[in-house]
Structures are given as C-alpha cells and as structure tokens.
Image: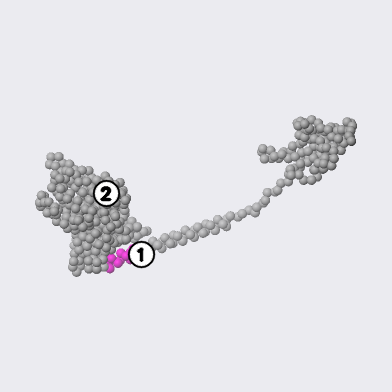
Amino acid sequence: MCVYVNKEDLRRCYCDGHCPNGEVNGTCEIKPGGMCFASVEAVLGEDGNEYPMWSYGCFPSGESGLMQCKGHLVPHLESKSIQCCDDVNECNRNLKPLYPERPTTEAPVFEQFDSLPYIVLLTSITACITIFLLVIAIIYKKYNRKDMQRKHNLYARNYQVKYPNMEVHGPLSNLIDQSSGSGSGLPILVQRTIAKQIQMVRSVGKGRYGEVLLANWRGEQVAVKVFNTTEEQSWFRETEVYQTVLMRHDNILGFIAADIKGGSWPQMILITDYHERGSLYDHLQTHVLDSNSLLLMATSIASGLSHLHTEIFGTRGKPAIAHRDIKSKNILVKRNGECCIADFGLAVKYLSDTNEIDVPPNIRSGTRRYMAPEILDKSISLKNFEAHKMSDMYAFGLVLWEMSRRCITGDKITTADEYCVPYYDLVPSDPSFDDMLDVVCVKKLRPQIPLRWETDDTLLTMSKIMQECWHANPAVRLTALRVKKTLYKLDTDTSIKIV
C-alpha cells in the first residue's frame, strides 16, 4: 500500500556538512515528524587549542531523529551540543547552540620543598669524610716516617759510635781517615751531623730512583742523591752496601753519609763524593778516547768490579757483592781519568759461612738493554751467587764495547765512531723484555765489532775480552779479576794476546 505525502507537509532545512548527494551546503527536506538541526562540537587546532565547529542538516522522522535531538542531554565522547526545530523552512539556519567548555582538571598544588636542611646535612657529611681522610693521611705519614727512622736506626746499632761528642770539622777526607778504619765510612752520628749541614746548590741529574744534587759542605762539593718515596728499599739496600766493612775502594764511589731528613714528608738522602765529569754515558757522548785513556778507564772499572765481587776473609771480613745493574750510566768518571762504580740499589751480598744470599723476588732486575741471556730467558739460578757475578760480567762486556767505539785509531788520520748504546741498531730506544729476548737469546746477536779495531793492539785485545764477557754460556765468561790482570799486563806490554 503506497502512502503519498503532500508537498505542503514537507519542510526544508538548511544543510552544511550533512547535505544529501554529497553537496557541501544547501537544503534538505524532512517529512512530518522530522527535525532540522544545528550542532556544534570542539575541534583541536594546530596550536593545541580547541575551537567550535558548527554543522547543519535534517533528522528523519521517527524515534531515532527525536533521540538525536535530545542528544545534548546525554554525554558524548566529544564535547557536542545540538538544537532542533521544525516550525518553518530553514528554521535551523538561525540556531546557534552554545559550545560546551571542556572541563579541565586543576593543576595540583605541591607543598614547597625546603632543601636547606638537606644541603646542610650533605655539606656536613662531606666535611666529616674529608677530615677523616686527612686524619688517616697524617697518621700514615707519621707512621711511615717512624717506620723508616726505625729501620735506619737498626743500621746504626751495628756500628759503634766512637765519637759521641765529636765536633764535625775539617775536610771530609780527614774525617774518614779518623773513622774506625774498617772501610765502612763515618760513624752514624757524624753522618747525621753532616746531613744537617748540607747546602743544596743545583740538580745535576735525575733517574728512576730520584734526583742527584750538587751540594756544599763547609766549602767542599758533595753529591746528594735524593730518593723517591717509592724507592725506600733501594735507599736501604744502597746504604747497607756502602756501610759494608772494607767496602771503600778507589774505583767504587766514595760514600760519606746517609740519613732521613724530616719535614712535611720524610726525605731519604745519600751523600757521596762529587765527580764533575759525570757518568761514563755522558762523558762518552762528548769525548773521544785514545788507547791510554781507554785502557785506564777499563782497568779501573775491572778493578772496582773485582773488589766488589771478592770476599775478604777475616774477623771483620768483607762479603762478596754482585752489583746487578752495571751500565755506563752507573759508572762515574773521576778527574784523573779513572772510573768508579755507583748505584748499589739492586746489589746483593753473599756470606759464604752461612751460604746466604739476599735476592729480591723479581729475577728481571736491572736495565733491560744490559741484561744477560740467562736473566732474559729466566734460566738464571737465583741461589747461585756466581750466576749474579757472571751477569755483571756480561754487562761489563757491553760497557767495554761502548768505550772502545769512542777510541781513536790511526797515526795520521784519527777516527772514532759516534757514541751508541749497545744493540742500538737491533732494538728500539726503550726495548721491551721480548725485544731483548729475541735479539740476545733467540737470534744470539751481539754488538758489531768494527774492522778498524784489528789495526790497534789495545782495541784488538779489548774486542777479545768483551766477546768472552758476553758469551752466551756464563761459565765461559771471564771473571773481573781475570780481566783486571789482563788489562794490567796489557798496560806494560801492548802486544799481549789474550788466551
């Protein structure tokens, strides 16, 4: 059954956004019971703010249209308001529903935080920790100073102070002559008195142990060796060796005094003779040698090393001592052209009656460039004192090579090679253990012997001595006494041939 609707009963509504046939705006028609509507909703703009957007259209007749017109009474997911009408055509054109404001939550109000007590607490804790650490450091410093002084006093107890009220005066040589005659240096009391009267002048050298200073004592020049705080054991070892009975020798650096000076930090010092020519290492770089000066230097070093290695028996005998760090930097040149051996921080003593030898736990001691093959490959027997003496002889052979390079040859044209350290052409300037192990032990290389040495009797003999000294087999190496006798004989007969 068809139902016809009179056109007079139809109403036109204004439409915008909800027009039939996809039109942008215009009109739409509603049957009786239908409604014209106007709605507004919130739209989020690009600036983050909300803006109202209106739309117009027709609701069909029926319950659904009526419910839509009452939609403003119920909440929507989006802020929205609708108004409806049906009294005249396009009645909704003039409708302007109000845009409902979106409810906003008020920003929470936080109670103001008072940070002052916490800042005060943190500052107090930091101050307490700082004070605590300072107290610990002061206590440690005082304990360390007392411990070092206690150890030094142990050495003093081993020597009788013959002059308890002695006034220190006169030249050092006179004082040493007035000492006990044991060859162990001045009494401990005199040593400490001299140490307090030393006046430092300037620095003359630095090394791994510390620094050497030129100083004055009552008009005489002396050398003061100041040890780093980390080299405590070296200071004790060197002091002990220098104060060994019958230690004094023309070719061993003259010892004067040892002491621990007070102050903000304990200072370990060693006072010795001063030799203005410096070390053999420095001397060879700026001076060339002739056969006589070479022979004098080599003989004096061998003589000092022989005295060091030799045990002197008696009621107050001297133990045998191995240096363990022979090199040109540890040998000083005296004014008369002779040399003397210095730096006994790694030396060890050997007492034959008790068969005791004091060796530090690290077998790789000394300077890598001058280490003997048995030290590099760790085959050395630490309890065998002869092994330490033979490692000294290996290093002595290298020192002979350094000196011989700087010796001139020829009558009309004098020539000498530039100064170089041993293995300069085979390893880097600061070689590692592996570098030296590869060259000395694996490849079995040694410093090159120049052909020009064959034309000079002194250099020819020196070359044979050094080659026997640096032999791979320690048992084959010459002893210091044998080298000393050979060089003395060479001085009187330059045509001698070493056996």
Residue 221 visible from this viewpoint: no
Toward the viewer: 120 or 248? 248
According to the picture, the residue beneath numbered tag 2 turns out to be: 443
User: Magenta stretch: residue 150 in it?
Assistant: yes
Residue flagged by tag 2: what amino acid is it?
A: Lys
Q: Secondary structure at mark 1?
A: helix
State the residue at coordinates (69%, 38%): 45
Toward the viewer: 315 or 25? 25
Nearer the observer: mark 2 or 1; the answer is: 2
Toward the viewer: 314 or 374? 374
Q: Which residues are magenta?
A: 147-157
Q: Position of residue 99 (x, y in %)?
A: 76, 40
Q: Are marks 2 and 1 in contact (CB under 8 Å)?
A: no
Q: Secondary structure at mark 2?
A: loop
Mark pair 2, 1: CA separation: 51 Å
The crowd level at tag 2 (other Cα within 10 Å; few <14, some 14-19, many 20+) is few
> What is the quadrant of the N terminus in the image?
top right
Residue flagged by tag 1: what amino acid is it?
A: Lys
Q: Where residue 146 is drawn, which disc sits there?
A: 1
Toward the viewer: 230 or 160? 230
